[in-house]
Amino acid sequence: MKRLHLMVTAAAAVVASLFLTAPANAANAANAQDTAPSAPAAVAADDPWNGQIFLTFDDGTNGIYTDQILEVLEQNNAKATFFMIGQNAQRDPARVRAVLAAGHTLGNHTWNHPDMTTLTRAQMDEQIGRSQTLLESFGAEVNCFRPPYGAHNTTVNQAITAAGLQRQMWNEDTRDWSRPGVDAIVDVLLGATPGDVVLMHDGGGDRSQTVEALEIALPQLAAKGYKFGITPKCSPA
């Protein structure tokens, strides 16, 4: 009987130890989760854009600034839409090909950048059609159009639709054309969230501020879990 009593006592002690140690282990696991390094911000489950910000560049091509922007985009695994002016593309076919070879998409930005609302319908059709023909001659699938200065009206919109294109505007303007300073451009970029279409320029003058701002902002946006893609309106089929 004494031996049986000792065996029962020992078994009870083992069972008790299991109940005592299990909560402690669970608590340790919870603490480990609390102290683990934080990951990049997760893309929201209801985000229809899959974490994508849409970078767009107007008025190119433009020599070394187009080259430098392409380099920064490559370093950050970013894709973008380049809204090219037809006459610029005609003068610089090598860079048009470089943009396409890097996996970016072209958009139509007229032949020589007029305010489309000041033109006749025939002139609108020529501006769109002449640029479209040139860009497509590079093998590009060009599905979208951006009116210079963002100026459009009913007749402009009808001309865009008649050309089989979609009008692509923007909702985040870096105003980099005015050279507001690198920090000002960075602030706009860092304020972008999935679904935003960001307006920048590789053409139209000195774009060194744009290049520097991209070098600063894109890694920070990527660290938040964001990606950089081509707008749905401009994406090849």
Image: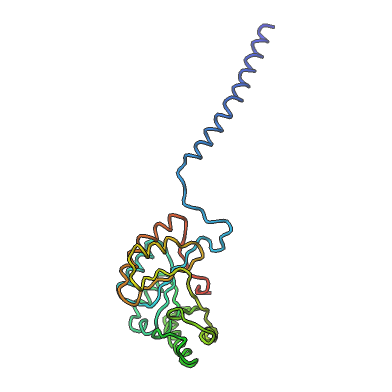
- Which residue is situated farthest in the right direction here? 1
Give the answer, above or below, for where 196 lies relative to 131.
above
Which image quarter holds the N terminus?
Answer: top right
Q: Nearer the viewer, residue 215 or 1?
A: 215
Relative side of 210 to 33, left or right: left
Give the percent coordinates (x, y) of residue 139: 44, 80
Relative side of 11 to 184, left or right: right
Q: Nearer the viewer, residue 22 or 49?
A: 49
Give the answer, above or below, for where 31 lies relative to 163.
above
Give the answer, above or below, for where 162 lies relative to 202.
below
Q: Quadrant of residue 85?
A: bottom left
Give the percent coordinates (x, y) of residue 21: 57, 26
Total numbered circles: 0
Q: Nearer the viewer, residue 45 or 106?
A: 45
Give the answer, above or below, for where 148 lies relative to 24.
below
At horizontal 58% and vertical 29% (from top left) the residue drawn is 23
- Which residue is situated farthest in the top direction here? 2
Give the percent coordinates (x, y) of residue 45: 57, 56
Give the percent coordinates (x, y) of residue 221: 43, 58
Here the colouring is: rainbow
At horizontal 40% and vertical 79% (from top left) the residue drawn is 84
Q: Nearer the viewer, residue 155 or 78?
A: 155
Relative side of 48 to 61, left or right: right
Relative side of 103 to 154, left or right: left
